[in-house]
Amino acid sequence: MPTQVSAPAEAQIRELIDGWVKAVRARDLNAITANYAKDVMVFDAVPPLRYRGTDAYRKNWEECFDMMQGPIGFEIRELSITAGDELAFSHSVNRLSGTQKNGKNMEMWFRATVCFRKNGGKWLVTHEHASVPFYPDDTMKAATDLKP
Amino acid sequence: MPTQVSAPAEAQIRELIDGWVKAVRARDLNAITANYAKDVMVFDAVPPLRYRGTDAYRKNWEECFDMMQGPIGFEIRELSITAGDELAFSHSVNRLSGTQKNGKNMEMWFRATVCFRKNGGKWLVTHEHASVPFYPDDTMKAATDLKP
């Protein structure tokens, strides 16, 4: 099936995602959370199992940025957007990279699914799911070595 | 924001998910995949990073069932459905449990996001994202001990 349902909505979501990627690279917490619903349900790559709310989401990014020195690398690949007049969802594989404050280089690909809803003419993220798969062997380690 | 956009669509998605849960418990591979788009994009709890297609999805469930003896426990909690006329998405925390063929008990809560699209009057799953968060410490282990 084609991913496009409404071309204008698809363009709006794409613009929103582009802005969000720039906001992450710029460490701009206000811009990162600008289009998130106050009660967004977040399934994050790290615990807890799930949490709700823009404040907690913002704090998570703040902690992430606090661990990194210098520029943040952020890249989105294989972005698919399915957008209607009122609802939309996207999925992609994303790469976060940079240098940690302990001097170690960090590079990680993760999967991201984002669900949007239009509210008063404005698109808002109501759900985000970010994750890394784990090896179902004795290690049970996160598969942070995978690349697309 | 309320999760309901279209009440009839919400009821259709709920019925579809109810049927899917029963199919997993019954180890019924045909019923599990009955409402999946042929080119569904899957972000699974275990590697690879992502894959596409009902055949691969079916094979994954088959391998999962092959590892388990006796009844499969499957439960969905905190299910939220947002459904419009053409698109829908849901998220929930799911519990898979049972006895492995090596005699070990298995119980795992994971997060699930499912995206749907109507095609010729029929809802199809076009994207599924299932995952367990990982501890960002030296172990990098999957947090399979978390409970809602």
Image: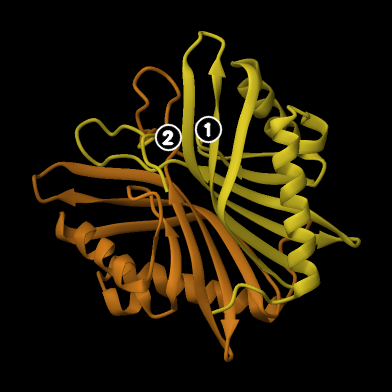
Chain colours: A yellow, B orange
Assess whether mark 2 and mark 1 are in contact (beta carbons under 8 angstroms).
Answer: yes
Disc 1 marks a residue whose amino acid type is Pro
Residue B56: numbered disc: none
> Picture coordinates of residue B106 (x, y %)?
24, 44
Farthest residue in the left direction? B102
Q: Is residue A85 visible?
A: no
Residue A48: numbered disc: 1
Please tell me which residue is depicted at 47% across the width and 14% down the height of the picture.
A104
Chain hosting mark 2: B
Count of all numbered marks drawn on residues in the image: 2
> Picture coordinates of residue A137 (x, y %)?
21, 38
Task: Between residue B94 and residue A119, name the one nearer to us.
Answer: A119
> Picture coordinates of residue A41 (x, y %)?
65, 46
At mark 2, the secondary structure is loop
At mark 1, the secondary structure is loop
Disc 2 marks a residue whose amino acid type is Leu
> Picture coordinates of residue B116 (x, y %)?
56, 71
Please tell me which residue is depicted at 50% across the width and 10% down the height of the picture.
A103
Label 1 to label 2: alpha-carbon separation: 8 Å
Which residue corresponds to mark 2? B146
Q: Taking A27 as reference, is B35 left or right?
A: left
